[in-house]
Amino acid sequence: MFTLDAFQITKVPESRLKPGMLDQPVFGQLPTDHMFMASYRNGQWEQGEILPFQPIQLSPFTSCLHYAQTVFEGMKAFRMNDGNVNIFRLDRHHTRLELSLNRMAMPSLPQELFREGILQLLDLDRNWVPDTEDAALYVRPFVFASEAQVGAKPANEFLYMVVCFPVVPLFQKAIRVKVETHYRRAAPGGTGAAKCGGNYAGSFYPTKLALEQGFQQVIWTDGSPEFHVEESGTMNLMFVMDGKLVTPPLSDTILDGITRDSLLHIARAEGIPVEERQITTAELFEAFEKGILEEAFGAGTAAVVAPISEIVWDERSINLPSVTANSIQMQLKKSLENIRRGYIEDPFGWNNIV
């Protein structure tokens, strides 16, 4: 059993946090004072420790640098209305991490090590959790093959780390997206449902091309002649069609997004009809022409809800109505934020108070 008081803790002499640092942080560039680290050797995980945020030393032979045997998670800690700190859906993130580890031939991470290490780290760095609306502390657990061996095989040594940094939502304005018709994010039987580094690296080039064309993201499809839509960049895709919340079903090419799952739970609880089914690109454009495609948005930990203003498919385009406070996506986002920040009761048991 991994317990809070068993972790070795080395604190910084003085916090780097200064007034104003949390106002508008750039995503992923402002680490908190501490980080968590645990090693996997000889077939087992060691106890782990919390230490000051610092560079780590790796051999040029480190396996993950050559074969990308690495997975990660992304979650947020929130400042609640009573001043407490809440880490959202911690156990669900562990479940997804386990699925990613298994797919990438990496050792299972004990739930106690995952949970207690994050809780203790957040308790130590709780002053880094912003108290402004929409801001949060991003928590990034990750595991990578740390063994110094250049051989095309699963490693025997791994490093598990957790780092944190303050964030505001990635997309604060409605975004333009293009349907990607040439490149694919994932293929059946591949690693699309795993949160592994290679999935993201493979998406960088087509996303770069889209950015150069004036888009903020792409819509990934399954590569079939029907162009079934799957995800939007690093987010799950959702649509409001004829008053229903419609989203592609989970598969081995779609990541099981925790924000996606949370919004679906809230929608059902609030009486909004939900459909999880395949959606062709042609159906989207036909629905828009018929006047029943009302909203489109991405859902993810970093973005929370990212409204989509325009969808472009080759020479065709859809211009969606402006989002208002009455839009379903905004209603769902508000309900989610109210739960996470303690303004309303958490009926799902999602909150973990540090």
Image (spheres, grey):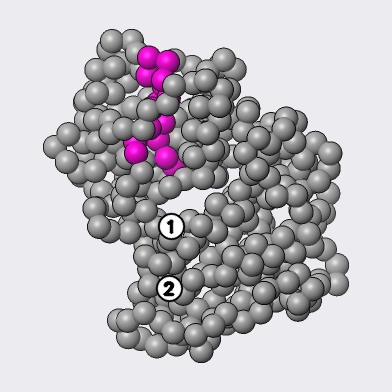
Residue 352: horizontal and vertical position, in percent?
70, 50
Q: Main secondary structure of the magenta part?
A: strand
Residue at 52% across, 20% down: 271
Q: Please state which of residues 337 and 108 is positioned toward the viewer in this rendering.
A: 108
| Mark 1 vs mark 2, CA separation in Å | 13 Å
Q: Please state which of residues 112 and 39 is positioned toward the viewer in this rendering.
A: 112
Residue at 72% across, 67% down: 34
Q: Is residue 31 above or below residue 313?
A: below
Image-quadrant location for residue 46: bottom right
Which residue is label 1 attached to? 195
Which residue is label 2 attached to? 106
Residue at 40% across, 88% down: 149
Q: Amino acid at mark 2?
A: Met
First-in-chain label (1 vs 2): 2
- Check disc 2: other Cα within 10 Å, few if <14, some if 14-19, many if 20+: many
- The answer to whether residue 320 of the structure is visible from this angle is no
Residue at 62% across, 33% down: 336
- Check disc 1: other Cα within 10 Å, few if <14, some if 14-19, many if 20+: many
Give the extent of the magenta segment.
235-249
- 97 left or right, relative to 125: left
Residue 47: horizontal and vertical position, in percent?
66, 79
**Residue 135 on the magenta span:** no
What quarter of the picture does the N terminus occupy?
A: bottom right
Residue mark closest to the camera, 1 vs 2: 2
Q: How many marks?
A: 2
